[in-house]
Image (tube, rainbow, N blue to C red):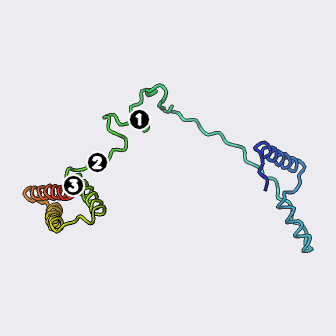
Amino acid sequence: MKTQTPQQIADAAAKRAASVAARKASGGLTVRQQRAAAKAAKAGMPAPPPPAPRVRAPRVARPTATRRRRHFNPFAGTFNAGSTTRPSNLPPANGAPIFAQPKPSLRALRLVALAAIEDAFRQFLLEHRANVTDDMRAAYAKYTKVKAIAMGGLAAAANDATRNEADAALRRAALQLITLGF
């Protein structure tokens, strides 16, 4: 199929619009109605009558509001008519970001850092697989035990002593993994 230029497309659309307007003005049948009439004639039945033209009800004017609405003018930067509400397109007044997320806790950030260090250590092992020694294996086993203590203490951190122990274990696990991988 040959591609048409935008001018050819516009000309074809104008031609279709003109033919539809001429058909409507002369009271002619639409293509669908013509096909239905041909099908009925082929079957030996009378053609269906054309549909009656639609008569639209006149539009009723809407009642005007008795109170004038207050609008925000984005170009002026101020509110019109002394509005006391802030529009939704302005940031909060306290300077906080619009889509503020709750700040993560220190413990959550430490866990994220530990996960990143573990990923770096795994990559180190993949690149230096031949250099893994028995001491490294023993140190990694010790790291997993300390990490288990940290995770267990974090999950059941009901009091300050348990929380402090879990934090200390988490710190020790991170340091062990750093010395092991770097």
Residue located beneath label 1 in the image: 90
Which numbered disc, 2 or 3, marks the residue that appears first in the sequence? 2
| Residue positioned 22% across, 50% down in the render | 105
Which numbered disc, 1 or 2, marks the residue that appears first in the sequence? 1
Which mark is nearer the camera, 2 or 3? 3
Image x and y of residue 134, in percent? 16, 69
Which numbered disc, 3 or 1, marks the residue that appears first in the sequence? 1
Query: Could you tell me how far apart the alpha carbons at marks 2 and 3 are, in whole angstroms?
Result: 33 Å
Q: Is residue 115 left or right of residue 169?
A: right
Secondary-structure class at tag 3: loop
| Residue positioned 15% across, 68% down in the render | 138
Query: Could you tell me how far apart the alpha carbons at marks 3 and 1 are, in whole angstroms?
Result: 48 Å
Q: Residue furthest left?
A: 161
Relative to 68, residue 59 above or below? below
Q: Is residue 112 left or right of residue 66?
A: left
Q: In this view of the protein, which residue sits in the foreground, 43 or 168?
A: 168
| Label 2: few (<14), some (14–19) or many (≥20) C-alpha neighbours in 10 Å | few
Residue located beneath label 3 in the image: 182
Query: Could you tell me how far apart the alpha carbons at marks 1 and 2 are, in whole angstroms?
Result: 20 Å
Image x and y of residue 68, in percent? 51, 31
Three-letter residue code for mark 2: Pro
Disc number placed over residue 102 in the picture, else none = 2
In contact (CB < 8 Å): disc 1 and disc 2: no
Dividing the picture into quadrants, the one containing residue 86 is top left
Image x and y of residue 27, in percent? 88, 52
